[in-house]
Amino acid sequence: MAYERVGRRPLDYRPVRYPGVRLSFRGPARDLRRDYLACMGGTETYGTFVDRPWPALLETRDGPACLNLGVPNAGPDLWLAPGGPLPLAQTARAVVLQIPCGMNLSNPFYAVHPRRNDRFLRAAPPLERLYPEVDFTEFHFTRHMMRRLHALSPERFAQMRVAVQASWVRRMAHLLDRIAPPVILLWLSNHAPGSGADCGGIDTDPAFVSRAMLDTIAPRARGVVMSVISDTARAQGTRGMRFGLMEESVATALPGPLAHREVAEALRPTLSAILNEKGPASRAGPS
């Protein structure tokens, strides 16, 4: 059994809240009156099943703290919503933003949950017209819906995908324009960016995000760091991860400790260059 093989109890993520933000984040809490880096992202940034995710690994004794603002399955809808983490990003020395899944956002074809962006809420009329044979009340998650729609008609699916990708580019551009500190975009995946047009892109995050989409938003950021998980890290499977009895199938799809170390090492050069620039020694923190 998974729990017996791991031999350790599941993680306590020590959830914390910060002023002006409605969400809970992974702890421990950081002092917002001091310099800090804001690490925004999804499940991988949150560090599900990992003792020390990459935001924690970036911290050094003499450097700024790292706020882990990862939220499982987060996307631009959550980040831009009232009560989201933007106030915390605005007072950071720098922001690392994990590239999110391209299908987990509201768009002209469907709506997602404003906080749990992987949750499908409802189809819009254009999608109902495109797939009149589908009962969309059967779906609760975007990925499940996408697999079904692609299987029914790759041609119609491609029409929808193009519109969803365009919405992602617009929302991400708007998000980057809203963030005042320098932003580093983080590509964290098992693969490099591709065309975004194949069915395999549904199951491997950041799903739907192509090289062209990344190139379109990149000029709004200070830089783009590519962290493609190595074969060595992938071969470790769930080694060093902590999860409960029924969670092994989820854990196998997530990066383990070595992958998180690779991410931190990939980010260090760009972050060091930004932090060495002249800037204020402390931050007031959000009110």
Image: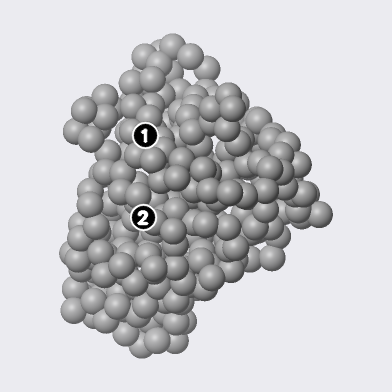
Q: Quadrant of the N terminus?
A: top left
Q: How is the image coloured?
A: one colour
Q: Is residue 269 visible?
A: yes
Residue 131, image x, y percentages? 31, 81
Q: Residue at x 42, y 31 (%)?
A: 247
Residue positioned most to the right: 287
Q: Quadrant of the C terminus?
A: bottom right
Q: Is residue 123 visible?
A: no
Image height of 218 relative to 98, above or below? below
The one nearer the camera, 5 or 36, is 36
Q: Callout 2, which amino acid? A: Val
| Left or right relative to 154: residue 84 | right
| Left or right relative to 116: residue 118 | left
Residue 73, image x, y percentages? 48, 52
Tag 2 secondary structure? strand
Image height of 244 relative to 119, above or below? above
The one nearer the camera, 236 or 33, is 33
Q: Quadrant of residue 90?
A: bottom right
Residue positioned most to the front: 278
Residue 208, image x, y percentages? 30, 64
The one nearer the camera, 183 or 170, is 183
Tag 1 secondary structure? helix
Q: Callout 1, which amino acid? A: Glu
What residue is shown with label 2? 224
| Left or right relative to 33: residue 183 | left
What residue is shown with label 1? 265
| Left or right relative to 153: residue 218 | right
**Marks 2/1: CA–CA distance:** 14 Å
Q: Residue at x 48, y 14 (%)?
A: 8
Q: Residue at x 35, y 49 (%)?
A: 225
